[in-house]
Amino acid sequence: MTQITARLPDELVAQIDQAAARLKRSRAQLVRQAIEYYLEDLEDLKLGLERLQDPADPILDWSEVKRELLDQD
């Protein structure tokens, strides 16, 4: 496993340490998991933006969708 060094504000480190203590995890585990979640969210955002730009994807009219949903039992 590769080790990475980063400079973080003392306040952020204190928050990381508090969260790690609450979750009974090490600082490294918490930071690693936070980065993993961030990268997953970034990928989801990228996919969402790609889908929004897809001309083949139909644009739905909210009023029509709402009317169809409310008219059904």
Image (cartoon, grey):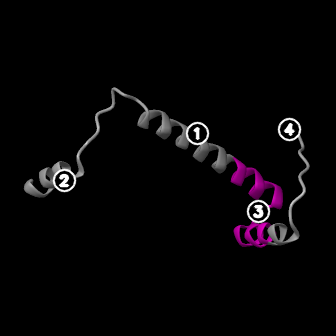
Sequence order check, earlier mark of 3 and 2: 3
Q: Counting other residues with Cα less than 10 Å from the Cα at mark 3, is it few (<14), some (14-19), or many (20 or more)?
A: few
Amino acid on which disc 3 is placed: Arg
Residues packed near mark 2 inside 10 Å, few (<14), some (14 to 19) or many (20 plus): few
Identified by mark 1, the residue type is: Glu
Residue span colored magenta: 15-35
Closer mark to the observer between disc 1 and disc 4: 1
Q: Is disc 3 in contact with disc 1, using a CB cutoff of under 8 Å?
A: no
Residue for point 33% across, 26% down: 56
Q: Is residue 28 above or below residue 11?
A: above
Q: Estimate the spatial distance between the alpha carbons at disc 4 and disc 3, rounded to whole Å.
A: 18 Å
Question: Of helix, strand and loop, which one carries label 3?
Answer: loop
* Residue that badge 2 annotates: 63
- Horizontal and vertical percent for residue 52? 42, 37
Question: In terms of image quadrants, where is residue 39?
Answer: top right
**Percent x, y for residue 61?**
23, 46
Residue name at image x 88 percent, y 70 percent: 10
Does residue 5 appear to the left or right of 21 in the view shown?
right
| Cα–Cα span, label 2 and label 1 | 31 Å
Name the amino acid type tagged 4.
Met
Amino acid found under the numbered disc labelled 2: Ser
Instruction: Determine which quarter of the picture holds residue 29.
Output: bottom right
**Pointer 4: what residue?**
1
How far across and down, in percent of the image, does residue 14 sit?
A: 83, 72
